[in-house]
Image (cartoon, rainbow, N blue to C red):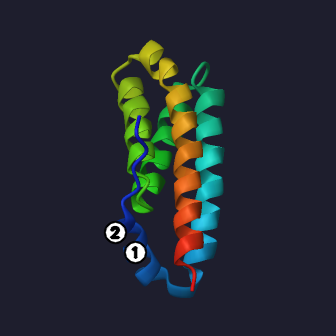
Amino acid sequence: MDTKIDESCLENMQALLGEQFSDTLEFCLSEFDRLANEVRATIDNDLEAATRNAHSLKSNAAQFGAMSLADASRTIEMALIEGNVDYAKTQVSVLCSEVDASKALLQHWLTSTKV
């Protein structure tokens, strides 16, 4: 998957949050890791929790422009909702790769836009 970041989402959040943007984005990046780890940890024994964590990751990612990560999260969320657990499990490695790639791109964007 080619990792995509929608910079207009970041710019909108930056305008909305002002001075709190950098800290909020850093927190969000740590949440990407936490939520992906929760999906991985619960997908074998608590599908409700795995679905909820995939949904939260999808929403957080989309809000900060991590569109590929949002898509990967949505894929798992929908597969779990539809009862396609085996397929969802195959997508966890994609999700984790997207977390890493999205975080790198978002951190680069943050570093390159700091004044």
Verify CB contact (< 8 Å) between mark 2 and mark 1: yes
Image disc number at residue 69: none
Quadrant in the rendering for residue 69? top left
Image disc number at residue 11: 1
- Location of the N terminus (image quadrant): top left
Q: Is residue 33 above or below residue 114?
A: above
Q: Nearer the viewer, residue 20 or 52?
A: 20
Quadrant in the rendering for residue 5? bottom left
Q: Which residue is located at x 45 percent, y 22 percent?
A: 88
Estimate the x, y position of residue 90 in percent, counting from the top left.
Answer: 49, 18
Q: Specify the amino acid type for callout 2.
A: Ser
Q: Residues within 10 Å of mark 2 (few under 14, many from 20)?
A: few
Q: Which residue is located at x 47 percent, y 55 percent?
A: 60
Residue picked out by circle 2: 8
Q: Which residue is located at x 37 percent, y 24 percent?
A: 79
Q: Specify the amino acid type for callout 1.
A: Glu
Secondary structure of the residue carrying numbered label 2: helix
Q: Residues within 10 Å of mark 1 (few under 14, many from 20)?
A: some
Q: Nearer the viewer, residue 59 or 82?
A: 59
